[in-house]
Image: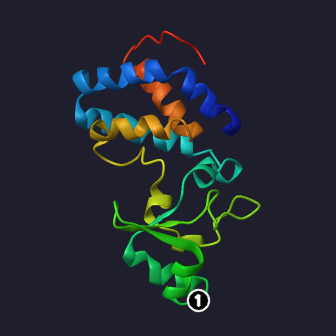
Amino acid sequence: MLKPSEVNKAAKVMEADNLRFRSFLKNHADEEELDKQFLVLHNELFADYDCRNCRNCCKMYKGTFQKYELEKAAGYLNITTDQFIDFFLEFNEIGCSYETKHKPCDFLDEVGNCKLGDMKPESCKTYPYTNQPERLWSLANMLNVVEVCPVAFEIFERLKRIYRFKNRRRY
């Protein structure tokens, strides 16, 4: 598996092939089978992977909170919801959600843990979404994820082997 520091560069090298593979899947993959394949690979690769040694997602994305998640996260930090919003968040009108003000995420500590513990937002808990259903309909987003997450990158490369898809380039 790639080192976290290498995944973005490798994904850029593979960008054209990944776009071709996305199109291939859209036209040839069975939705249910693809979801099963993603899930099996997700479970296999994450079984021994410690995300704290990477945290590219926390470094490269802003955390996204839905309104219903604010009170619990604020309470975990022993501050009010208004203080939580004022200190850490900005409203995203497009997504009707709140995002952290900074990258890397304000809640990422020095050893790779989230300062919000189990109160971190659902979007963070489920990233990189490779175990979620309906992967066929979110392959465009997967192309962004493979630039950030070494496990997602590896899942995509293994899917190419499963489908006997020939890369034109090698990372």
| Picture layout, residue 10 above or below residue 110 | above
Residue 28 spot, x, y in % from top left: 24, 21
In the image, residue 47 above or below residue 163: below
SS for tag 1? loop
Of 77 and 91, which appears nearest the observer? 91
Tag 1: Cα neighbours inside 10 Å, few (<14), some, or many (≥20)? Answer: few
Q: Residue at x 43, y 10 (%)?
A: 166
Q: Which residue is the extreme one toward the right?
A: 110
Side of 136 relative to 126 (left or right): left
Q: Quadrant of residue 19?
A: top left
**Residue at the image point whose x is 47% and y is 38% from the top:** 144
Model colouring: rainbow
Which residue carries the number 1 mark? 79
Residue type (three-letter) at the residue carrying disc 1? Ile
Q: Position of residue 1 (x, y in %)?
A: 63, 31
Q: Nearer the viewer, residue 95 or 115?
A: 95
All told, the count of numbered labels is 1
What residue is rendered at 60% in x and 26% in y? 10
Front residue (pair 44, 100): 100
Residue 67 percent location from the top left of the image: 38, 76
- Residue 58 in which image quadrant: bottom right
Q: Residue at x 28, y 43 (%)?
A: 134
Residue 60 in the figure: left or right of residue 137: right
Q: Which image quadrant for residue 49?
A: top right
Q: Quadrant of the C terminus?
A: top right
- Vertical comparison of 13 with 59: above or below: above
Q: Residue 106: x percent and y percent?
A: 64, 66
